Amino acid sequence: MSFEIETKLSAPDTLVLPTINLTPTGLRKIGLPAKQNITTYFDTGEFDLYSCGAALRFRRRADAGLDETGIWTLKFGPPVEGYTSSRSEFEVEASGIQAPKEFMPALAVFGATEAMNELASLAAVRRSIIFEAEGGLPVIELDDDLVEIVDGPNKGLRFREIEVEHRVDGYGEQCENIVQLLLSAGASYARSSSKLEQALENSQNHGLFSKLRDRYDYQAVSQLGVLARLVLENPEDAEAQMMHLARVLVTGLQEESVRRFIEGLVSRIAECGPLSGGRGSGLVQVIGEQVVSLSEALRKNDDSDAKSPALPNLAVELVSEFVAGKALSHRREASSDLEVYAGLLADLANLPRAAFHTGDEMIEGFIGNWS
């Protein structure tokens, strides 16, 4: 997983890239060989992904077919208008026949549970320049793309797009200097942060993407991004899952969302028994199911009014209230100890099913230990 901050510029074909010398700032410039690729974008018929600030694409060599190996990319972050975007990015190497199974839980979070449609395909010649810091760390990437839409509503349209990607924190000033040099050379800010919009929007559907961006509340979409990261990161690492879950519950969700999520999680443990214990334990699946359930309410913007399902018994109610209360307590502290709360969640995941039905002492012990 990476987090990208990208500024996109439009440029005429005749524009000559200016000399960019960042040596005085300690960065070395490396030009990469040109690459030809074809990128195909996917979404549901209702544009569920785009409405949630997400994009799914498959990129392959220009001479490769969809059945050959390429790179699937899932990006997401709140939808924005204009030329700059900040998004999480996940990549999987696979054939283009269907979206990789690793993405399925996150796609479901965004409501994309039906078959995907091919929206458009773009052929591009990409020339890239990497700016490296000491030790060879790539911190800025400039991609100069000559693009032709080869399939989609705007088939035949050609355009040139230049992307300046801020890959590592601390180099924002250098990125802005590069952007200003490109603007001085004749580039302009792109009207959109997405190639997909240029591939699809035309006079017949003018305003479509603006409407899609306004479908859901900005805060709700931000929450969905947090949940999508939860089900994508470290699927085989139980300890990492607990740390990320702790981070989501302590910092990522509104209070009512925290309570609903935890009530569902505790109810599942009471029904199914321990969820921890390593690979194949069901923890990721259960978390994924709870994320999808919560995301439905978030997308509908009615989270604050939604009623939690009835809890099966008093033990589940007590544990849910305690675990949620601890999350909210950590949230209010100036410096939350996520490792401590992750430990609480790990113990929660190991509670046996019987504890919620016949083992009152185990419930009392769990609450007493973490009080």
Image (cartoon, rainbow, N blue to C red):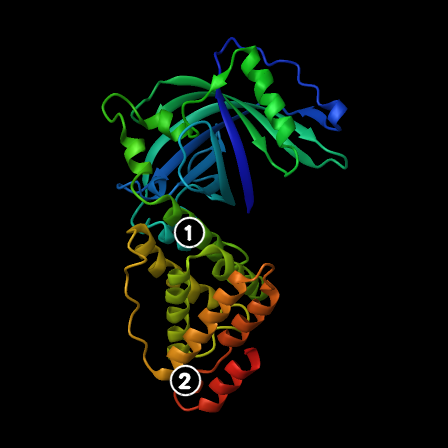
Assign a secondary structure to mark 2: helix
With respect to residue 19, does 62 lie above or below?
Answer: below
Residue at image mark 1 = 223
Q: Residue at (61%, 59%) from the top-left corner?
A: 335
Asked if residue 78 can be seen in this view, the reply is yes
| Distance of label 2 from label 1 (alpha carbons) | 30 Å
Q: Residue at x 40, y 65 (%)?
A: 261
* Position above or below: 193 against 113: above
Q: Residue at x 29, y 74 (%)?
A: 310
How packed is label 1: few (under 14 Cα within 10 Å), some, or many (20 or more)? many
Q: Could you tell me residue 286's position as x and y percent?
A: 42, 67
Which label is found at residue 46? Answer: none
Q: Earlier in the sequence, mark 2 or mark 1?
A: 1
Task: Answer with the quarter of the image where residue 313 lies.
Answer: bottom left
Q: Amino acid at mark 1?
A: Gln
Vertical position of residue 162 compared to residue 112: above or below: above
Percent position of residue 333, x then y? 56, 62
Callout in the foreground (2, 1): 1
Residue 77, position in %: x, y? 44, 42
Q: How many badges with numbers are in the image? A: 2
Please name the amino acid that badge 2 sits on: Phe
Residue tagged by mark 2? 356
Is 232 displayed left or right of 24 in the figure? left
Q: Which residue is at 32% across, 79% downward?
A: 312
Residue 201, x across and y down, in percent: 31, 26
Circle 2: is it few (<14), some (14-19), or many (20+) Cα within 10 Å? Answer: many
Seen as rendered, the residue at the extreme left is 204
- Name the residue nearer the viewer: 90 or 266: 266
Q: Are marks 2 and 1 in contact (CB under 8 Å)?
A: no
Q: Is residue 210 above or below residue 340?
A: above
Classify mark 1: helix, strand or loop: helix
Looking at the image, the residue that sits furthest to the top is 14
